[in-house]
Image (cartoon, rainbow, N blue to C red):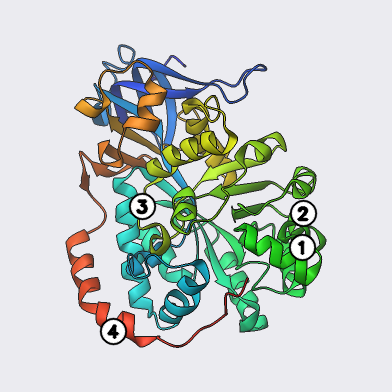
C-alpha cells in the first residue's frame, strides 16, 4: 500500500476507484507467491499506469476525470489468456466428441484452409468481446492472418502477444512471414501489442526450421510461442521417430535458449524437467485443462513438477474450437481441481496458488511480468472489478476460494486496460457484438463448406 495519492500541484487523476477489496502480491522469503487482500481500498490511475494503491479515505477528495464506486467488488489484475487462437471462435462447436487426430484432419484443418481474412476478423472481434466480458485484459494468440488480429486488438483496446503461425510445409516463406509480422507490429497499439515467432510444433516444423527460428529469435530479441509435448502420444511418437522427446528437440535446436512459451505440455516427462530448469531463456508453459478433458487425454500439465523446476505456468483456454469457451475463470478453477486429483493431494493447488498462476505467473509467461499481472504502483493499469454480492458468492469466508471456485466470468463488472475502460457495468464500449455475430452467422455455410477435404499439414502423432 502506498500513500500520497495526489502530490501537491498534480493535475487530476484520469481514474479513481474506491471502496473495493484489492488483491495484492506480497512476496516473502517464506512464500514468494503470497497473495493478500486489502479492504476498502482506493486505486489511482494516471497516464495508463497505477499511481497509487491506498485507502478509500485517502482518495475521497481527489480530483479525477472519472470515478468508479466499487463497493462490494474485488479489484484484481486483469486475467491473461496465455495461449489461444482467437479467430477459431468462428469454429466453435463445429468438431465435437472426436479423437484428436480426427478433430484435426477431418474437420478443423480442412476448414481452416478456406478461411478468409474477413472470417478471421469476425472471429477475432467476437473472441475479443468474449474475453473483455470475462475480465481478460491480455491474450497470447498463435494463428494466421495475424495482421488482421493485430488490427482488431488495436481497435478494441486489449493487450496481446501475437505470433504468425507457420508449418515447415509452407517452406521458408512461412518463417519469413512470421518474422516480418513480428518485426513490423512489435510495440504497436501504443505498446499494447508485443510479438513472437510462432512455429506450430516440433511434429509439424522440422529441426532445421526450429534451429533457424531460434537463431532469428536471438538475433531480433523475439520470444517464441509454440505447441510442444501437447500430449503423451506426441511424446511417444517423437521418441520412436527421433529418439528424443519434443522438449529434447527444443533443446538440441536451440529453442530452449530463447524466451519461450510452450502450449500445453501434458506430455512433458520427468527426463525433460532438468532441460527446462537449465533453459537459457525465460521458459513458461500455458495450461488449458478443459480441452484435455474433452479429448480424454490421460494426463494434464505437470504444474507441480514444472514449478519445482522453476518454470512459470500460465493459464489458458486454447481456441474455442476445442475448448468452446475463452473463459479463464473456468481454466483457473479446473486447473486447481485437476491438479488436486492428479496429485492425490487436496492441499495442492490452493486457491491462492491458482490466483498467482492467473495473475503474476501468467504475466511472466507472456513476457510482461514487469508491467502487468499485479495491481501496484508503476504497473500498467490493466485491472478488473468483480461483483461479490451475488448469492453464489456469499458468504465470504475465504476470498481467494470465492474468487477461484465461486465467481463466474459474468461477475466481472468492469474491465480496464492501460487505464481505459473497455467494459463498464457489463456494457462493452469498444466492440459491437450484435453486428459481428449476425455477419458471422450469415457466413457460416460458406465458411464450413469452402475448405472441406483440403489440409495444410497432417496430424499423425
Q: At which x and y percent is residue 372?
A: 50, 38
- First in residue order: circle 4 vs circle 1: 1
Q: Who comes first in sequence, dot 3 or dot 4?
A: 3
User: What residue sits 57% from the left and 39% below the top?
Assistant: 369
Name the residue at 45% across, 62% down: 85
Please provide percent x and percent y for residue 1: 46, 16
- Cα–Cα span, label 2 and label 3: 32 Å
Separation of marks 2 and 4 at Cα, in angstroms: 43 Å
- Identify whether 459 is placed above or below 275: below
For label 1, the residue is 249
Which of the marked residues, 2 or 4, is nearer the chain's N terminus? 2
Q: Nearer the viewer, mark 2 or mark 1?
A: 1
Position of 177 compared to 453: left or right? Answer: right
* 107 is higher (above) or lower (below) than 201: below
Q: Mark 3 or mark 2, which is nearer the start of the sequence? A: 3
List the residue tagged with mark 2.
257
| Residue that mark 4 sits on | 446
**Which residue, given by chain and number where applicable, does mark 3 sit on?**
157
Give percent across and percent down for residue 260: 66, 53
Tell me how far mark 1 sits from mark 3, CA to CA: 37 Å
Of helix, strand and loop, which one carries label 4?
Answer: helix
The answer to whether marks 2 and 4 mark residues whose Cβ atoms lie closer than 8 Å is: no
Amino acid at each position: 500500500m502506498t500513500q500520497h495519492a495526489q502530490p501537491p500541484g498534480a493535475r487530476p487523476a484520469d481514474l479513481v476507484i474506491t471502496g473495493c477489496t484489492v488483491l495484492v502480491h506480497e512476496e516473502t522469503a517464506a512464500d514468494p507467491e503470497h497473495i493478500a487482500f486489502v479492504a476498502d481500498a482506493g486505486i489511482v490511475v494516471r497516464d495508463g499506469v497505477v499511481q497509487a494503491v491506498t485507502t478509500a479515505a485517502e482518495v475521497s477528495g481527489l480530483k479525477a476525470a472519472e470515478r468508479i464506486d466499487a463497493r462490494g467488488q474485488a479489484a484484481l489484475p486483469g486475467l491473461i489468456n496465455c495461449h489461444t487462437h482467437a479467430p477459431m471462435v468462428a469454429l466453435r462447436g463445429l468438431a465435437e466428441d472426436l479423437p484428436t487426430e480426427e478433430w484435426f484432419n477431418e474437420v478443423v484443418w480442412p476448414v481452416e484452409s478456406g478461411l478468409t481474412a474477413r472470417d478471421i476478423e469476425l472471429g477475432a472481434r467476437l473472441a475479443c468481446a468474449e474475453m473483455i466480458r470475462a475480465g481478460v485484459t491480455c491474450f497470447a494468440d498463435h494463428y494466421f492472418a495475424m495482421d488482421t488480429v493485430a488490427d482488431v486488438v488495436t481497435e478494441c483496446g486489449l493487450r496481446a502477444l501475437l505470433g504468425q503461425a507457420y508449418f515447415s510445409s509452407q517452406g521458408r516463406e512461412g518463417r519469413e512471414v512470421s518474422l516480418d509480422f513480428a518485426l513490423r507490429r512489435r510495440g504497436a497499439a501504443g505498446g499494447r501489442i508485443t510479438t513472437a515467432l510462432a512455429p506450430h510444433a516440433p511434429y509439424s516444423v522440422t529441426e532445421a526450421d526450429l534451429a533457424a527460428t531460434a537463431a532469428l529469435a536471438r538475433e531480433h530479441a523475439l520470444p517464441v510461442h509454440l505447441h510442444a509435448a501437447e500430449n503423451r502420444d506426441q511424446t511417444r511418437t517423437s521418441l520412436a521417430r527421433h529418439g528424443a522427446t519434443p522438449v529434447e528437440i527444443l533443446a538440441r535446436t536451440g529453442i530452449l535458449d530463447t524466451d519461450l512459451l510452450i502450449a500445453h505440455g501434458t506430455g512433458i516427462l520427468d527426463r525433460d524437467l532438468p532441460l527446462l530448469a537449465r533453459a537459457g531463456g525465460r521458459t513458461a508453459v500455458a495450461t488449458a485443462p478443459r480441452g484435455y478433458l474433452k479429448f480424454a487425454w490421460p494426463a494434464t500439465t505437470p504444474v507441480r513438477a514444472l514449478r519445482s523446476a522453476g518454470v512459470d505456468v500460465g493459464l489458458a483456454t486454447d481456441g474455442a474450437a476445442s475448448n468452446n469457451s475463452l473463459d479463464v475463470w473456468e481454466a483457473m478453477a479446473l486447473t486447481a481441481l485437476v491438479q488436486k486429483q492428479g496429485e492425490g493431494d487436496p492441499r495442492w493447488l490452493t486457491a491462492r496458488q491458482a490466483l498467482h498462476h492467473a495473475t503474476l505467473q501468467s504475466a511472466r509467461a507472456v513476457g510482461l511480468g514487469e508491467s502487468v499481472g499485479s495491481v501496484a504502483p508503476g504497473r500498467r493499469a490493466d485491472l478488473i472489478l468483480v461483483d461479490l454480492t451475488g448469492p453464489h458468492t456469499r458468504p465470504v469466508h475465504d476470498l481467494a476460494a470465492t474468487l477461484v471456485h465461486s465467481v463466474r466470468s459474468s461477475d466481472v463488472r468492469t474491465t480496464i486496460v492501460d487505464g481505459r475502460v473497455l467494459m463498464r457495468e457489463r456494457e462493452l464500449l469498444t466492440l459491437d457484438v450484435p453486428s459481428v455475430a449476425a455477419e458471422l452467422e450469415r457466413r457460416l455455410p460458406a465458411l464450413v463448406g469452402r475448405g472441406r477435404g483440403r489440409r495444410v499439414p497432417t496430424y499423425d502423432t
